[in-house]
Structure formats: C-alpha cells, structure tokens
Image (cartoon, grey):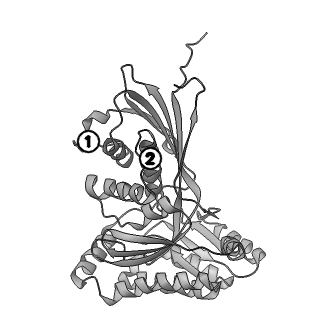
Amino acid sequence: MGEKKSSPLRVINSVAPIRILDNGGWTDTWFAEHGRIFNIGVYPYAEVQMEVYPFEGGDRVTIYAENFGEKYALDPEKNGTGDWDRHPLLEAAIEMMHVPREYRLQVTIYSEAPSGASTGTSAAVTVAMIGALDFLTPGRMTPHEVAYTAQSVEVDMLHQQCGIQDQLCSAYGGINFIDMFKYPHSSVSQIGLPNSIWWELERRLVLIYLGNAHSSSQVHEKVIRELEDAGPDCSKLEDLRRTAGRSRDALYAGDFEELGRAMIDNTEAQRRLNPGLICGDADGIIETARSFGALGWKVNGAGGEGGSITILCGDLSHEKRAMIRAIEEGNSYRNIPVYLSRYGVRIWEKQNGNRE
C-alpha cells in the first residue's frame, strides 16, 4: 500500500473575474496621469486553491500552474532578490505577501480564459493569489487594497508597464466606472442595473479570442513614448476618456445602440494612437460582425497583434449564433462564453473538523 497522504490544515479558495470591454483603456496609466475607464468583470474566473500544511522541513511552497502542466518548488525566503524565472507574477506575489514560516503551501492556479487574450487574465490570477495569501493571515484587505497590491507586484517588483483598471475590475467585479483622479489613485463606482438590462447586456455580449496570445510589443512602446511627449491632456487620450462616461450613461438608460457607438469610437481612438493596435484579424472580425448587424465592437486591452475582441450584438439571438459560426468557420478564432460577474474576488476556506 502507498504512503497515506496527510490532510491539509486548511484549504483556501479564491476566484476573480477577468475583464472585457474596457472603454477608456490607456488612460489608466502613469503617462495619462488621470483617466476614466468603463469595464465589465465576467466569467470565466481565474482560480487559486491553496492547501496549507504545517512546515516540517523541505519545500516551503509548491506551485502547480495547471494550465501549463508545471509543478515546481519555490523558496519564498528569497525576498527582495528579484529571482523570479518561471512564473514571475505568481512568485513575486508570494514574496510580497510573506508566507508565515510555520506553514507549507501547495498553490494550484487555473484559468479557463486563455493566456494572452487581452482580458486581464494575469491581473485576475494575481488578484486571486493576493486574496488567498491575505486570507492565510489575520489581515483582511479591502478589494481596493487587493487591487493595488496586485498592481504593485507588476509595476514595483517586475517593473512592467501596467495600468490600474484590470486589477480593480478583478477585485470589484460587476460593471465599473473608474475615475483615476491622479495616477494611481482612483475611485470605483459600480453600475447597478435592473435585472432586465443586466440580462439583456449579458445576452448580447460575445468574446472572440483571435487565436494568438497577445504580448507587449514595440508598437506599445512607441505609443507610450508618443503619449508621454504629448502630455496627459492630448486629444488622443481625451477621445478615449470620453467613451467611458458615454458607456456608463448608455447602460443607465438601457441604450444599447449608444453603448455600441461608444465601443466603436473607442476602437477607432485606439487606431488613431497607432494603426497597429487594431490588427488585420480584428478588422476581419469587425467586418463580419458588421454584416450580422452587431451594434458595436471593442478590441480588448491595449490592442495589437493577437488578443481578443468584444462584440455587442443586436436584438436576435439566432443572428448572434450565426455570426459566431461565421467568425469561427475556417479560422483559429474561438468564441469564449462569458457571463457577467456580480462579484469581484471571492475568498473562502474549507476547514477540517479537527482544526484547533
């Protein structure tokens, strides 16, 4: 018989939604200085499950990155060295949160959303990880604190270009209007809607993955340099900021046509930042969506090669399904079913009955 596996002291679960339809994106950055962003938190979630054992020697932390089929040990005592090589976001988050020395952890990370889809998946994973690690100790961060800690991992520890909106969306969930009054400080107003409008919005939304993982590129660096030189109140950034308020007001009015126009205007404002932010694949999908009567489309995230696009469909569901079939046929594009998330990061635990 095999060796009996010991039971964990605690099993902590954490899930956080991804982000779509980020009208006003690019204005949540250090070079924009101030911004207004509209975005929506949706399923599929990023999931973190943390098994907590007493530390009795050996490896302190084991990471199981399930999507990549990787399982490896991590030494969290390397705090401050910056020696993160396999999954830097996960490893840096663990170092930042200071795992108590009396515990040994096995951390499993999983997401049904593909990596590099420009839907804030990495931010959702980091938010879920920070939330689970916070639950390990007596501290209880607010959603705002979880979001800013997750953003600090990317900006301060990994020295990456990173706005604030993805982490805030994953922490709060729902439909958000974010007013960044001075980078990185912001307020988050959640948009409460009658169920009929909420359900109708959910029915109309389609998320299409272009089949190629998005990553930062020379195009993004060029855009950042140009925006930095132009200043925070340049017309290109103002065009983006305006679409966030229009999106909020359209939903409060139940005006899906106006929401669609705001999405289109935001995508064209991205194109004015640099034509390369709207790739040829995205333009092809836009033309197909237009031919099926879609009301609007938004290239998710910063744009560029790969990634994904959110489409706001018209009144008839069978036309939406026909559009999805036409987009997917003969291509590597893939529809990712999404459902609006009423909640942001959620953390809970299963406790063994014999826990003291």
Q: Position of residue 159 (x, y in %)?
A: 26, 57
C-alpha span from label 1 to label 2: 19 Å
| Residue type, numbered disc 2 | Met
142 vs 344, left or right, is left
Q: Which residue: 41% across, 83% down? A: 241
Q: Quadrant of the N terminus?
A: top right
List the residue tagged with mark 1.
Answer: 83
Comparing labels 1 and 2, the label whose residue is closer to the camera: 2
Residue at position x 51%, y 27% in the image: 9
Name which residue lies at 24% across and 85% down. Answer: 230
Percent of width and height locating residue 271: 42, 83
62 or 147, which is in the foreground? 147
Question: Going 41% across and 39% down the picture, which residue do you hit?
Answer: 137
Instruction: Indicate the secondary structure of the residue bearing disc 2.
Output: helix
Q: Which residue, as the protein is rendered here, is positioned at the far top?
A: 1
Give x and y (percent) for residue 272: 39, 86
The residue to which callout 2 is attached is 129
Label 2 Cα neighbours within 10 Å, binned few <14 / some 14-19 / many ≥20: many
User: Would you identify the image quadrant in which residue 95 lies?
Assistant: top left
Mark 1: amino acid: Asp
The correct choice, above or below, for 123 with respect to 306 in the image is: above
Where does the image place residue 232, in percent across and percent down from the top left?
28, 82
* Tag 1–tag 2 contact (CB < 8 Å): no
